[in-house]
Image (cartoon, rainbow, N blue to C red):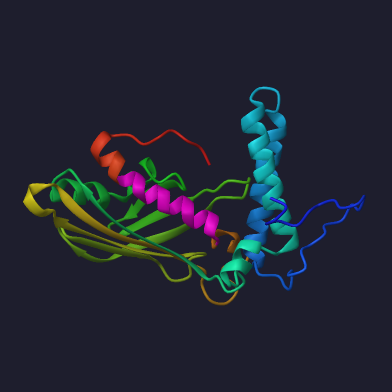
Amino acid sequence: MALIYPRLLQQGKTHPVYPQNYKHININTAERIFSVAAGSFLLYSGIKHLFKNPFVAVSKAVAGGTLLIRGTSGYCPAYAALGKDGTQSEAINVKQYFTINKSRAEVFAFWRKFENLPMFMRHLQSVEKKGDNLWHWKAKFAGGVPAISWNAEIVKEEENHFIGWQSIKGSVIVNTGKVEFNDAPNGQGTEVQLVFSYHLPGGGIGTGIGWLINPLVENLIREDVRNFKQYMEAGEVPVTSI
């Protein structure tokens, strides 16, 4: 870890000591806030369960400390090594392709009822139907950050083949998505192509929820999407919490 992350202590000093190639802040403010929140949560959880399960507790504490350093310093050596400037992050875009061993009509019908999505998408707390073509979405994330909500509508639909949706104008977050269903070769079920995106709106509307747009949340959503296949085929997904 010392080769990757700044050391907290060196020769009795109590302030962070950064590597020589530490040049600039390469994590945006939103991601720093999320890193500190998630890091604090993991560190607290690790300390709380230290004597119940030392190995897991220490792992959580180390991960939490790492995130805290990342958030408070604003510097990510991994980003630096990849030449990535995280301050330019503006969106989460998830694309997945998979085959589900169910009929196209069955898979389409399940997804078309958006209220089903929280069954396998852990980051979604609820999706409620509010009108003929309007749904209220609520998302939750780790670290004690408040849930966010928005309204979305279907903008394009072809029965048993395609569904496209987007959040309505003025929403605190811009959520867009499309999912396409095609018969798999040789009667092997349904091929699903899914695109799922979160964007911050222009102006000041998205202020305060920028923590959403970061790689940690993107990985969570990517895993949630993969859960769709397991839920459709087995009727359940691994029981985990965020």
Between 19 and 44, the one nearer to me in the picture? 19
Q: Please indicate, yes or no, whether residue 131 appears anywhere in the rendered image.
A: yes
How would you classify the magenta stretch by its main secondary structure? Answer: helix
Q: Please indicate, yes or no, whether residue 208 appears anywhere in the rendered image.
A: no
Judge from the rendering whether residue 30 lies leftward or rightward of residue 184; answer left or right.
Answer: right
The residue shown at (66%, 32%) is 57
Q: Which residues are magenta?
A: 214-228
Q: Quadrant of residue 89?
A: bottom right
Judge from the rendering whether residue 14 lies leftward or rightward of residue 236; answer left or right.
Answer: right
In this rendering, the answer to whether 83 lies above or below 132 is below
Magenta span includes 223:
yes
The residue shown at (68%, 42%) is 62
Measured from the top left, where is residue 131 in percent x and y?
Answer: 32, 56
Between 241 and 168, the one nearer to me in the picture? 241
In this rendering, the answer to whether 133 lies above or below 26 is above
Judge from the rendering whether residue 22 lies leftward or rightward of residue 215; answer left or right.
Answer: right
Q: Residue furthest top?
A: 52
Magenta span includes 217:
yes
Measured from the top left, where is residue 13 in percent x and y?
Answer: 91, 53
Judge from the rendering whether residue 121 lies leftward or rightward of residue 235; answer left or right.
Answer: right
Q: Residue furthest bottom?
A: 203
Measured from the top left, where is residue 94 in percent x and y?
Answer: 39, 61
In this rendering, the answer to whether 65 lies above or below 215 is above
Figure label count = 0
Between 145 and 97, the one nearer to me in the picture? 97
Measured from the top left, where is residue 173 in percent x and y?
Answer: 49, 64
Q: Residue furthest right?
A: 12
